[in-house]
Image (cartoon, rainbow, N blue to C red):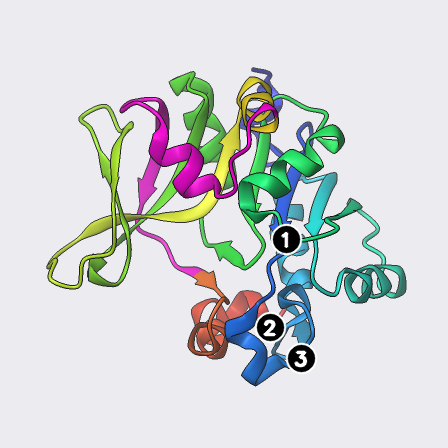
């Protein structure tokens, strides 16, 4: 691991894969048939904020795994080019799921490790800390986990005493208390990407992560604000999560 990973420009030497091929069915009542990446927040598409966030950590190459209404995103990028980041669109011919999308995009991922993230997520967290944790842990992958005060609405990530992932627990409305949840941002080794690409998994979370032996994955768990624009409610509240950031 080079010193670049420990600087504020820690994403400069690695590729980022954004998984954004979903249909966005839950958002259709408020955004119509446009893809989630183009959902408007304070008058700008979510994609603009996502690229800006990655750019603050020095990102130079971002691969977009696209599906539904991919051409609309490509048209937007052509009309609004990002001068500091090379954006590479990869278009799935049909929905492959998160693991399938990674498999389809594997040939475009050239670095070791790679940052992989859901395309409806933005977190107020230092990605350089996540990369540093991954380097120290020397695991297949490191999962960013958000610690929330009420975890009853989410599936939970169970951590062991070393901060590695001991297991995953399905959503339990009867659960009360603090819990760690998957924030949808990962650092993965090239070897792990190859494992996934050589398999037939559909869901990265259920078919890959949850099937691994305990301790196979590291985690970085912390309290931070995050956006998941996957529902009308979360999209509506996005402007209030990082008001200063979204106004710039």
Residue 214 part of the magenta-drawn span: yes
Of callouts 1 and 3, the N-terminal one: 3
* Cα separation between marks 2 and 1: 34 Å
Please provide percent x and percent y for residue 150. Answer: 20, 61
Point 41% across, 36% down: residue = 143
Q: Residues within 10 Å of mark 2 (few under 14, many from 20)?
A: few
Q: Nearer the viewer, mark 2 or mark 3?
A: 3
- In the foreground, 102 or 202: 202
Residue that badge 2 annotates: 247
Q: Secondary structure at mark 1?
A: loop
Give the quarter of the image for residue 103.
top right
Residue 19 vertical placement versus 199 (above, below): below
Instruction: Give the extent of the magenta segment.
Output: 198-226
Marks 1/3: CA distance? 29 Å
Q: Residues within 10 Å of mark 3 (few under 14, many from 20)?
A: few
Looking at the image, tell me whether mark 2 or mark 1 is earlier in sequence order.
1
Q: Which residue is mark 1?
A: 95
Where residue 149 appears, as percent x and y from the top left, is 20, 59
Provide the secondary structure element on which disc 2 rests: loop
Q: Residue at x 50, y 40 (%)?
A: 127
Task: Give residue 230's position: percent from left, percent from top.
Answer: 49, 66
Q: Is residue 226 left or right of residue 105?
A: left
Q: In the rendered structure, are the residues bearing label 2 and label 3 in contact, judged by CB atoms less than 8 Å apart?
A: no
Q: CA distance from mark 2 to mark 3?
A: 10 Å
Which quarter of the rendered picture does the C terminus lie within? bottom right
Query: Mark 3 = which residue?
Result: 43
Tell me, for residue 222, which label it has, or none: none
- Is 101 or 218 nearer to us in this picture? 101
Residue 11 vertical position relative to residue 4 in the rendered view, above or below:
below
């Amino acid at each position: 691991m080079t010193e670049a990973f420990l600087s504020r420009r820690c994403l400069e030497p690695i590729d980022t894969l954004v998984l954004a091929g979903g249909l966005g069915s839950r958002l259709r009542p408020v955004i119509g048939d446009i893809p989630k990446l183009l959902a408007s927040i304070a008058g700008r598409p979510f994609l603009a904020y996502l690229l800006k966030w990655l750019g603050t950590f020095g990102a130079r190459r971002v691969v977009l795994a696209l599906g539904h209404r991919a051409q609309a995103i490509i048209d937007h990028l052509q009309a609004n080019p990002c001068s500091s980041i090379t954006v590479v669109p990869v278009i799935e011919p049909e929905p492959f799921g998160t693991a399938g999308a990674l498999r389809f995009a594997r040939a475009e991922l050239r670095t070791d490790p790679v940052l992989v993230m859901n395309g409806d997520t933005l977190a107020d967290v230092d990605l350089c800390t996540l990369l540093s944790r991954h380097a120290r842990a020397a695991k297949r992958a490191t999962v960013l986990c958000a610690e929330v005060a009420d975890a009853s609405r989410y599936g939970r990530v169970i951590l062991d005493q070393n901060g590695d992932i001991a297991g995953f627990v399905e959503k339990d409305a009867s659960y009360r208390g603090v819990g760690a949840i998957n924030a949808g941002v990962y650092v993965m080794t090239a070897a792990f990407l190859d494992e996934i690409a050589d398999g037939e998994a559909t869901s990265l979370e259920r078919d890959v992560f949850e099937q691994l032996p305990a301790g196979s994955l590291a985690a970085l768990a912390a309290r931070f604000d995050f956006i998941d624009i996957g529902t009308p409610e979360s999209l509506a509240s996005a402007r209030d999560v990082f008001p200063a950031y979204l106004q710039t």
